[in-house]
Amino acid sequence: MIIPKLPLDVAIDTFIDYTTQNFSFITKSISSVMEIGINTVNDALMFIPPLLLIILFVGLAWYFSTRGIAVFTTIGLLLIWNLGLWAASISTLTLVIIATFLSILAGIPLGILAALNNRARRVIMPILDFMQTMPAFVYLIPAIPFFGLGVVSAVFTTVVFSMPPAIRLTCLGIQQVPEQYIEAADSFGATKKQKLFQIQLPLATPTIMAGINQTIMLALSMVVIAAMIGAGGLGGEVWRAIQRLRPGMGFEAGIAVVIMAIILDRITQNIRKQSE
């Protein structure tokens, strides 16, 4: 007996075709606004002289991290500048900043909702499991018909890929607040809003910052994959090196990605430690 194949692919294609045909005016509007925002951030960072921006990053590394990381930041960013990858690195940094901002903007409220509402948590957590087990390349498929090729699709894909840690760790941080603090607040007649903003969120800040750190790392890990749909930046350099069979060029861009990852990781990790 031959069991007929479920037409899942046809159903998904039909859904995407329907939404793109009937709601394209919404996605085009979102795409236009996001493109303006992305270009504005990128132009603002490019307007700053490279040496001045390097000094700024070194200052952040020195203040939030250690002298060793500050020295590494100096050497690493000067190397990126010397290799002629400064513009590509700024483009990648812009993508990471925008994607992380949007992930936090959506992720923290969803994490709070999941922590405070059992029904919402039972819905949100399986969706996060699905998002985190789905291969990253699959996220590229719906982005193209909705937003077309380019940096907007790359940001959309990166947000979907990097958002789960922000939601999960916000939820975990709030759930880990000792019960005696909540009971003490209840005994003094605190409202839910007062408990959330004056007790739960401040105590959960280190865990939330860990989620933000992971979100940044996932966003940065997506840059090479997102280059396939026009993200540009360092991922675009790696993708061009693959297409042209130039391993040296790809290795240089890969080193630049690693340098940026270490700098962002160490700075955000130490911000988390300072919040404990």
Image: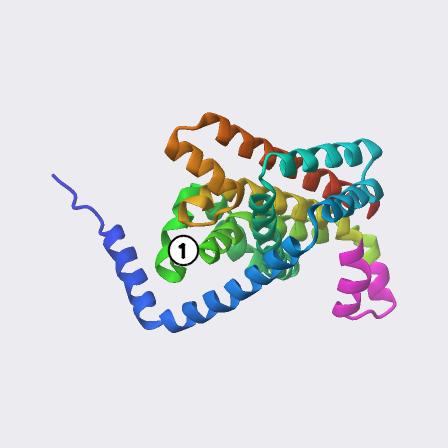
Point out the residue furthest to the left here: 1
Q: Residue at x 78, y 44 (%)?
A: 55
Q: Residue at x 42, y 72 (%)?
A: 26
3 displayed left or right of 229: left
Q: Quadrant of the N terminus?
A: top left
Say if 41 sits above or below 215 in the image. Answer: below
228 displayed left or right of 91: left
Residue 194 lies within the magenta run: yes
Q: Residue at x 32, y 61 (%)?
A: 16
Q: Give x and y (percent) for residue 168.
A: 61, 49
Magenta segment, prevailing SS (helix, strand or loop): helix
229 displayed left or right of 249: left
Q: Quadrant of the C terminus?
A: top right
Q: Give x and y (percent) for residue 153.
A: 44, 55
Q: Give x and y (percent) for residue 154.
A: 47, 52
Q: Is residue 243 visible?
A: yes
| Depth order, front residue of 60/101 | 60
Q: Residue at x 41, y 68 (%)?
A: 28
| Depth order, front residue of 134/177 | 134
Scheme of image coloration: rainbow
Identify the residue under disc 1.
143
Q: Residues within 10 Å of mark 1 (few under 14, many from 20)?
A: some
Tag 1: amino acid:
Ala
Instruction: Give the residues in magenta.
Output: 183-202
Q: Give x and y (percent) for residue 244.
A: 38, 32
Q: How many marks?
A: 1
SS for dot 1 = helix
Residue 256's image quarter? Answer: top right
Residue 13's image quarter? Answer: bottom left
